[in-house]
Image (cartoon, rainbow, N blue to C red):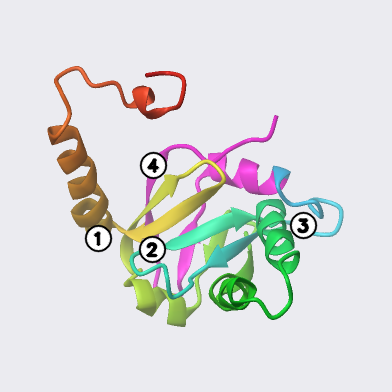
């Protein structure tokens, strides 16, 4: 069974754009990198910063992103769907490597796009994790979750949203 990204971690971005990847997330990246440790001395990952992502970056294991690439490339050539997915996903992603100290460097252009400086939040999403500026995460996602829960009856169990559990 594949490891998944779970949990929420507060991290810092230094002036050079380096962020420590939580140890648990590094284990997932290592198991999802077919070249680790044979070719790569450190695990690699793919950072997605597409124009459709206005608040945060997404980070995938190499294998998970290859699955997405394979699906896109299997679409009919010349189709509008393949063209838009190629531009937003394949064209607006980058390969990165975790350094020997467990950090990844986010390029300045992407840091500036999302306001990634100082405090950040890494949030596990199963097949990927999100990288948020801490203030934006609290404002957007915190408000979204509170609003959703406020609309539920007392004692609401979020697992009831899964099919077959309600």
> Which residue is at the front of the view, 36 or 99?
36
Mark 3 element type: loop
Report the residue marked by disc 1: 136
- Marks 1 and 4, Cα distance to the nearest angstrom? 15 Å
- Residue 65 occupies quadrant: bottom right
Residue at left 23%, top 55%? 140
Of marks 2 and 4, the one in the foreground: 2
In the picture of the structure, the residue carrying the numbered disc 4 is: 8
Decide which of 57, 22 is in the foreground and name it. Answer: 57
- Alpha carbon distance from label 2 to label 1: 9 Å
The numbered mark, 2 or 3, whose residue comes first in the sequence reads 3
Q: Are marks 2 and 1 in contact (CB under 8 Å)?
A: yes
Mark 4 secondary-structure assignment: strand
> What stretch of residues is rendered in magenta?
1-30
Q: Which residue is mark 2?
A: 56
Of circles 2 and 3, the one toward us is 2
The residue under label 3 is 41
Sequence-first disc among 4 and 3 = 4
Distance Cα–Cα, label 2 vs label 3: 28 Å
Question: Is 94 situated above or below 37?
Answer: below
Based on the picture, tell me whether residue 23 belongs to the magenta stretch.
Answer: yes
Residue 19: horizontal and vertical position, in percent? Answer: 47, 61
The reply to whether the C-beta atoms of the residues labelled 2 and 3 are less than 8 Å apart is no
- Residue in the foreground of this view, choosing between 105 and 152: 152
Give the residue drawn at x 73%, y 71%. 76
- For label 4, the crowd category at 10 Å Cα-Cα, with few meaning under 14, some 14 to 19 and many 20 or more, is some
Between marks 1 and 3, how big is the CA–CA gap? 34 Å
Separation of residues labelled 4 and 3 (CA atoms): 26 Å
What kind of element bears circle 1? helix
- In-front residue for pair 26/145: 145
Q: Residue 48, position in %: x, y?
A: 53, 66
């Amino acid at each position: 069974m594949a490891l998944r990204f779970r949990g929420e971690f507060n991290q810092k971005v230094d002036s050079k754009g380096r962020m420590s990847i939580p140890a648990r997330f590094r284990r997932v990246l290592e198991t999802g990198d077919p070249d680790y440790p044979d070719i790569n001395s450190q695990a690699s990952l793919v950072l997605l910063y597409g124009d459709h992502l206005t608040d945060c970056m997404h980070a995938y294991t190499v294998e998970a992103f290859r699955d997405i690439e394979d699906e896109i490339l299997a679409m009919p050539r010349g189709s509008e769907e393949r063209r838009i997915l190629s531009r937003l996903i394949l064209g607006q992603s980058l390969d990165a490597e975790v350094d020997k100290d467990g950090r990844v460097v986010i390029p300045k252009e992407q840091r500036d796009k999302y306001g990634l400086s100082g405090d950040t939040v890494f949030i596990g999403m199963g097949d990927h994790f999100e990288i948020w500026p801490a203030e934006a995460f609290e404002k957007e996602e915190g408000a979204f979750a509170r609003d959703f829960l406020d609309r539920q009856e007392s004692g609401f169990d979020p697992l009831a949203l899964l099919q077959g559990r309600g």
